[in-house]
Image (spheres, rainbow, N blue to C red):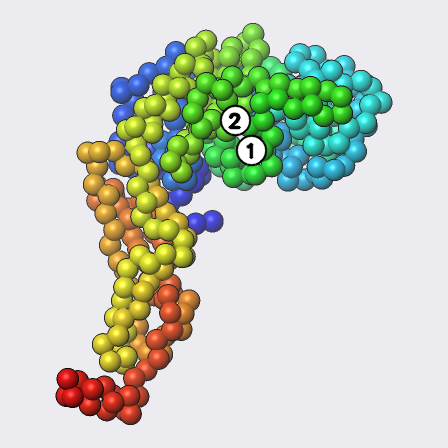
Amino acid sequence: MHRRVCACLAAAVLLLGGLPVRCRAVGTSAASAILMDVDSGRVLYAHHADTRMLIASTTKILTALVAIRDGDLEDVVTVSAQAAGTEGSSMYLRAGEELTLEMLLYGLLLCSGNDAAVAIAEHVGGSVAGFVERMNAYAAELGMENSSFANPNGLDDENHYSTARDMAVLACAAVQNETLVRIASTRSVTIGGRTMTNHNKLLSMEEGCIGLKTGYTRAAGRTLVTCAERNGQRLVAVTLQDGNDWADHQSLYDYGFTTYPARKGAVLGQETARASVAGSGGGSVPLVAAESFSWPVAAEESFSMRLELQPLEAPVLAGTEAGEAVFSVDGTEVGRVTLLCGRTVLPLSGAALETLKQGIFKE
């Protein structure tokens, strides 16, 4: 994990840590909502984001993550009668039918197949109960502190709930998974004689939308978790119990990308600063970033970098840690990046010094 205050697990800390959330600049029809920057975890908008809510089929984001992590996409799954008979939205599986796990994931994320969810759970977890245990364990690993999962499909259950914030944390983890994004961003696909169309209309409505998942039950209302990317910046939006979710997500993205464009502080492998090297005759070494770092910054906020470097003395080998770049917004530290020496610097020998002196005097 990055050493910076990063990604989704730090979102709650950031919300309470002094960086403002401008909730009045945009609004939704949702009972609960949140907008989060993926790479930093910064919360850009929140409304009742910690209220426990029913989440319906957005559950299937976690189902897919567990299946991709613990299963093999090429595994052949035999559909049980229990899976085929699952109530609610369906990809219309038949008992005894054989499909690959990858095909079931398409049915899970595009068609929102409750039957696919059960078939996946039985195959990957050995049973639905066994799979649900994995779901809850994974949610705990991600830091989803106010979530509980009772099934793999999101059907209403008093022990099945989450919050907008926790679902944003899940979404941030999900969009790091290339397989999940590839499937969730597919608008339509024909596999094994089935043509499946994605229920997520935002894929065609919102610039740069890359998924993730819709949901609905009568008790939960409309639930929606999505991710969009512009200019290399990714945001996730979550709305729970929202009858106007498509338009609300578009408004949230317009607000987020316009108000909080990402500022690049460091780029992996590129020079971020320079440092002098003692014993090298006044030479210096480029300091390159060990990882990339960016942060969403509003126009009225000040984004700054300071260096915390250790003394360098020749010989210095390329790749040697030289210290850290420390990034702040309005004086509040938001992250650190390790800096590495970008080249080898050898000590200047007596002979080399003499040659240097002669050259200077000749000029």
Q: Identify which residue, 356 or 32, lies in the foreground.
A: 356
The type of residue carrying mark 2 is Gly
Q: Position of residue 323 (x, y in %)?
A: 33, 62
Question: Residue 94 at what x, y percent from top left?
Answer: 80, 18
Query: Rounded to the nearest whole Å, what is the CA distance between mark 2 and mark 1?
Result: 7 Å
**Residue in front for this viewpoint, 29 or 15:** 29
| Residue 264 visible in the shown view | yes
For disc 1, the neighbor class at 10 Å (few under 14, some 14 to 19, many from 20) is: some
The three-letter code of the residue at mark 1 reads Val
Residue bearing the label numbered 1: 181
Q: Where is residue 28 in the image (x, y as percent from the top left)?
A: 37, 14
- Which quadrant holds residue 351? bottom left
Q: Is residue 213 left or right of residue 133?
A: left
Q: Is mark 1 on a helix, strand or loop?
A: helix
Residue 90 is marked as: none
User: Does the CB distance between marks 2 and 1 fall below 8 Å?
Assistant: yes
What residue would you read off at disc 2? Answer: 211
The C terminus: image quadrant: bottom left
Q: In this view, does 138 lie above or below 290?
A: above
